[in-house]
Image (spheres, rainbow, N blue to C red):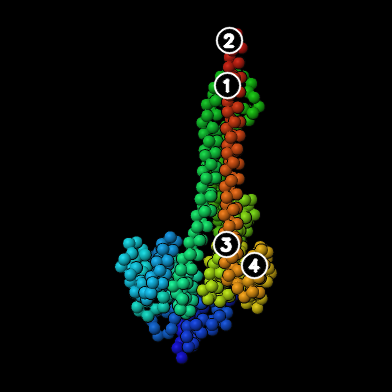
């Protein structure tokens, strides 16, 4: 009976490796699932001298997200056209114009010709192919639907990239307006107001209270500018050091979810990416427990990562996913209800894909509302500041002119 070497994620955390006997790769995957192990790499023993735990070398080329999406979709198209994997990689290595994609294709083909599986070849070719990517490729190899798996992966990555772009684009205009407001205040406070002070000091007139307050504020900022800058830099460094710790990162990741306007967007973005990724994994044949473990390793928010880890423990004990998420706490009832319905009907992956579409629309709406609300607020604040400063300047000038006329008369 053939032997397979594997590397997998254990239920308690950490990576484990070993060997097992199975008639096929699919049976080997089922054995790992029965042992509550999430496979990261699986290959038949004796096919290659490279161990299952091998990873890409330090000099291996990296692909950014755009290049990774293009590589995946291009390879999927070639496979759907009927080309074998090795020939498809050869075509990409010879015809591709982008040097990074061409290099990754060449290395993947080389490792594949040496007897590695495609998932192992990707892992050796570039660190851009993470555990989630290679696990999906391995599932596609085992099920014989590699082209379809790659197509769905490319579509999923494109949707996630679109979410990121929309979020970033929505923040550009508010950030620009906030920067312009801060710059305008700095110019008034540090340059125009001191000159106004010199002018008014020569008249000896009593200034309006608002003007005196503005002058005092300007004087304070001018005298303590470096102290304020150093204090702000020190506070920023201390904050970054605090959130670099495990407890600090957990607190900050949770606190971000309660920031007005921004928190709901971050939460909705997590639900959109979580349901989409989990639905994609299940559709491609990855077992539920293995899919959840892969998603935990790929979740950047430590607060949600902790909650998902608690849910995984409950699922390992035999609870349905919807029940496990409810017990973990802090997950939206809407998502757990949709998952519960999918479990009852036997179409969990389909339910997750529908939930992903729902959250995608909700995220788009929240981003539009944020942009619509933040921009007018900043503009109004900017108008108030400019009006206040202009009033102080004009009223002070009129007061000075009146004083000069009185003295001359």
Work out whether mark 3 precedes mark 2 in sequence or the reverse, and give the earlier one. Answer: 3
Q: Is mark 3 on a helix, strand or loop?
A: helix
* Location of the C terminus (image quadrant): top right
x 44%, y 81%: residue: 43
Q: How far apart are marks 3 and 1 (CA)?
A: 60 Å
Q: Is residue 177 left or right of residue 263?
A: left
Q: How many marks?
A: 4
Q: Do the residues labelled 2 and 1 touch (CB within 8 Å)?
A: no
**As drawn, which residue projects farthest toward the front?**
81
Which numbered marker is on residue 408?
A: 2
* Cα distance between the residues tagged 1 and 4: 67 Å
Which residue is painted at 69% across and 69% down in the image? 327
First-in-chain label (2 vs 1): 1
Kindly identify the residue that appears in the image at 42 percent across and 66 percent down.
73
Task: Determine whether 47 is above or below 123 in the image.
Answer: below
Residue identifier under label 1: 397
Cα distance in 3D space between marks 4 and 3: 12 Å
> What numbered label is drawn on residue 338?
4
Q: Which of 249 and 257 is in front in this view?
A: 257
**Residue 8, placed above or below residue 225:** below
Residue 357's tag is 3
Q: Which residue lies furthest to the left in this view?
A: 94
Mark toward the start of the polypeptide (2 vs 4): 4
Q: How far apart are marks 2 and 1 (CA)?
A: 16 Å
């Amino acid at each position: 009976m053939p032997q397979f070497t594997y590397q997998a994620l254990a239920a308690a955390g950490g990576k484990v490796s070993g060997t097992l006997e199975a008639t096929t790769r699919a049976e080997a995957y089922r054995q790992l699932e029965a042992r509550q192990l999430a496979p990261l790499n699986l290959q038949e023993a004796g096919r290659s001298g490279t161990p299952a735990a091998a990873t890409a070398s330090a000099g291996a080329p990296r692909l950014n997200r755009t290049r990774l999406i293009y590589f995946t979709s291009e390879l999927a198209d070639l496979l759907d056209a009927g080309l074998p994997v090795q020939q498809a990689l050869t075509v990409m290595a010879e015809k591709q114009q982008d040097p990074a994609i061409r290099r990754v294709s060449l290395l993947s083909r080389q490792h594949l010709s040496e007897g590695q599986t495609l998932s192992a070849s990707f892992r050796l070719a570039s660190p851009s192919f993470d555990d989630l990517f290679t696990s999906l490729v391995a599932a596609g190899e085992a099920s014989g639907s590699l082209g379809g798996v790659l197509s769905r992966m490319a579509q999923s990555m494109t949707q996630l990239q679109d979410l990121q772009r929309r979020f970033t684009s929505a923040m550009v205009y508010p950030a620009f307006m906030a920067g312009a407001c801060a710059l305008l205040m700095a110019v008034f406070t540090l340059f125009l107001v001191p000159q106004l002070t010199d002018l008014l000091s020569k008249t000896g007139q009593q200034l309006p209270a608002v003007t005196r307050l503005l002058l005092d504020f300007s004087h304070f900022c001018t005298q303590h500018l470096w102290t304020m800058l150093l204090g702000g830099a020190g506070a920023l460094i201390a904050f970054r050091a605090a959130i670099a710790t495990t407890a600090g990162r957990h607190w900050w990741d949770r606190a971000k979810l309660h920031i007005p306007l921004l928190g709901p967007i971050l939460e909705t973005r997590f639900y959109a990416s979580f349901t989409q990724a989990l639905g994609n994994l299940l559709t491609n044949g990855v077992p539920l427990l293995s899919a959840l473990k892969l998603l935990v390793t790929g979740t950047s928010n430590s607060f949600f990562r902790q909650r998902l880890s608690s849910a995984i423990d409950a699922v390992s004990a035999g609870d349905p996913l919807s029940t496990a998420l409810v017990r973990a706490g802090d997950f939206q009832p809407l998502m757990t209800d949709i998952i519960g319905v999918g479990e009852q009907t036997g179409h969990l992956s389909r339910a997750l894909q529908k939930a992903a579409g729902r959250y995608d629309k909700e995220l788009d709406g929240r981003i539009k509302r944020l942009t619509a609300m933040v921009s007018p607020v900043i503009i109004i604040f900017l108008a108030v500041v400019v009006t206040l400063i202009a009033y102080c300047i004009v009223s002070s000038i009129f007061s000075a002119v009146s004083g000069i006329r009185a003295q001359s008369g």
